[in-house]
Amino acid sequence: GFLAALLLVVLALIQHAPGLLFGRVRAPLAGTTASEPWREAATNRDVLVPAMQRAAAVVAEGSLPTWNPYARLGEPFAASGAPVLHAPFWLLAIGDGRRQLELVLFLHSALACVLAYRMLRAMAISRFAAFVAGGTFGLGQAMTTALDRLPEAAAMALLPWTVAASWRCLF
């Protein structure tokens, strides 16, 4: 169990190595056109990272990050692209957020792999099948495409945990 989970984390690290280790920008997979190949991946860099940095500035001033007066005419931080209740996103408030964004992308891919593996093992699926399915879920096209919009990827990464909890309650 532990070695399979560790191997899934290593595979996620290999998938995200260009961004984590070499600083290369992750290429988007969804909704791109030939004229705007950067549009989807820029959603994380241009919306999420600045919103989290504004939320961190509000916290540094001694207030709770509930209202963002700088977005449009003012709106809640959650509506302006800063999911302040999801703890891993606070890493994006450190520095310029570029390297931290790659780290958060990696963490969510690895989390999706491991949680899918654990969910299937809780359902009495064989180790090999759970390993293959966990890797397919966390490193496959659906999760990789969801990483273009990190809040969606965070929800998707936690989905196996909620299914496993529901499974335990029902059976």
Image (tube, rainbow, N blue to C red):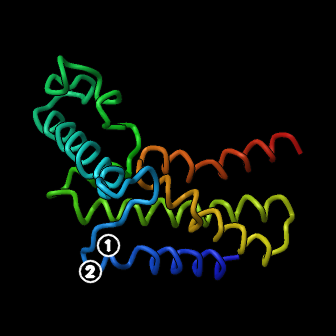
Residue farthest toward the front in the current orientation of the protein = 34
Q: Is 108 located above or below residue 31 in the figure? A: below
Left or right: residue 94 versus residue 108 is left
Q: Secondary structure at mark 1?
A: helix
Spatial separation of the CA atoms under disc 1 and disc 2: 6 Å
Q: Nearer the viewer, residue 85 or 103?
A: 103
Q: Badge 2, how many Cα within 10 Å: few under 14, some, many 20+?
A: few
Q: Nearer the viewer, residue 91 or 99?
A: 99
Residue 70 image point, x, y percent: 14, 27
**What residue would you read off at disc 1?**
19
Q: Secondary structure at mark 2?
A: helix
Residue farthest toward the right in the current orientation of the protein = 171
Which of the image's four quarters has the N terminus? bottom right
Q: Badge 1, how many Cα within 10 Å: few under 14, some, many 20+?
A: many
Could you say which quadrant of the image residue 13 lies in? bottom left
The label number, if any, that marks residue 32 in the structure image? none
Residue at 29 percent across and 23 percent down: it is 76
Residue 81 image point, x, y percent: 32, 36
Q: Amino acid at mark 1?
A: Gly
Q: How many marks?
A: 2
Could you say which quadrant of the image residue 133 lies in? bottom right
The label number, if any, that marks residue 22 in the structure image? 2
Q: Nearer the viewer, residue 37 or 160?
A: 37
Residue at 36 percent across and 37 percent down: it is 83
Q: Is 124 located above or below residue 4 in the figure? A: above
Q: Amino acid at mark 2?
A: Phe
Q: Are marks 1 and 2 in contact (CB under 8 Å)?
A: yes
